[in-house]
């Protein structure tokens, strides 16, 4: 009887691609790049904190890191089955890892923190989303986002230019503005001025989008997804 070997791999303090190659060379049937780092978490009153320096640190913030590792491996010709993990606490996060190129997803922390019922709900929500968006199966979904890796410089620049133009042209919605002033604080080009306590963009705007990103009320808004989806 041959038992399949699934190797869980770190992405810290090593070249993840070489670690994958070594595991596969040693006979691994599947690889599981996992986002965990040595951390030092403590309270300001450190005497009241558990002594766990070097303990595994991860969380939802690790998702983009492990997604990149998976995508980079696929772009470099790694064909072996993957079951990546790290930062998966929602069906959306699971979908992103699969779209980056991992056939399966680790849900250990999610199951431990929220229980098996939450896992069942995640799977049901994931299935509903796939039906709604027209993905027939996991195979069709796996690696679908790698188009962002393969995008030509010309297309990338066209998307950037269109988004920048939208940022420059869009004006503030006075009815939604709370006059908090955050947009002024982040504008390094002094392209926003106050007019009767209302921020107004000037012709000095370069379209960087910082003010849109910090606006807490949506008074500064452009449909980023709609703009980018026009060119890909």
Image (tube, rainbow, N blue to C red):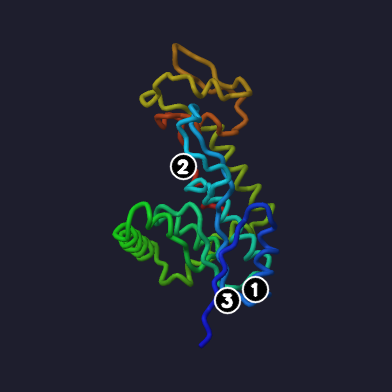
Are the residues at dot 3 and dot 2 in contact (C-beta closer than 8 Å)? no
Count residues near mark 3 (Cα–Cα under 10 Å), then give few for <14, some for 14-19, many for 20+.
Answer: some
Q: Mark on residue 29? A: 3
Mark closer to the observer (3, 2):
3
Q: CA distance from mark 1 to mark 2?
A: 44 Å
Q: Which mark is residue 52?
A: none
| Distance in Å between CA atoms under marks 3 and 1 | 7 Å
Residue at image position (44%, 11%) is 196
Badge 2 is on which residue? 223
The disc, 3 or 1, on the residue closer to the chain's N-terminal end is 1
Tell me what residue is drawn at x 50 percent, y 30 percent: 46
Q: Quadrant of the C terminus?
A: bottom right
Q: How many marks?
A: 3
Q: Report the side of 224 relative to 191 (left or right).
A: left
Earlier sequence position, callout 3 versus callout 2: 3
Residue at 66%, 60% (x, y): give it: 16
The residue under label 1 is 24
Q: Position of residue 214 (x, y in %)?
A: 49, 30
Helix, strand or loop for disc 1: helix
Tag 1: Cα neighbours inside 10 Å, few (<14), some, or many (≥20)?
some
N-term-proximal mark, 1 vs 2: 1
The residue lying toward the viewer, choosing from 185 and 133, is 185
Cα distance between the residues tagged 3 and 2: 43 Å
Corner quadrant of residue 191: top right
Q: Position of residue 212 (x, y in %)?
A: 50, 32
């Amino acid at each position: 009887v041959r038992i399949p070997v699934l190797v869980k791999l770190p992405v810290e303090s090593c070249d993840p691609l070489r670690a994958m190659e070594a595991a596969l060379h040693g006979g691994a049937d599947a690889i599981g790049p996992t986002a965990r780092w040595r951390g030092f978490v403590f309270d300001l009153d450190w005497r009241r904190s558990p002594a766990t320096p070097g303990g595994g640190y991860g969380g939802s913030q690790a998702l983009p890191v492990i997604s990149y590792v998976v995508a980079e491996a696929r772009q470099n010709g790694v064909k072996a089955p993957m079951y990546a993990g790290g930062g998966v606490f929602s069906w959306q996060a699971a979908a992103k890892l699969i779209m980056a190129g991992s056939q399966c997803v680790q849900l250990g922390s999610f199951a431990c923190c929220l229980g098996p019922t939450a896992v069942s709900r995640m799977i049901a929500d994931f299935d509903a989303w796939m039906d709604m968006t027209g993905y027939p199966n996991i195979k069709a979904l796996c690696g679908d986002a790698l188009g962002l890796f393969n995008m030509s410089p010309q297309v990338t620049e066209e998307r950037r230019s269109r988004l920048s133009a939208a940022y420059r042209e869009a004006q503030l919605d006075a009815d939604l503005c709370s006059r908090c002033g955050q947009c002024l604080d982040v504008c390094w080009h002094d392209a926003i001025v106050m007019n009767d306590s209302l921020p107004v963009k000037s012709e000095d705007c370069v379209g960087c989008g910082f003010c849109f990103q910090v606006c807490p009320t949506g008074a500064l808004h452009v449909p980023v997804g709609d703009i980018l989806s026009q060119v890909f």
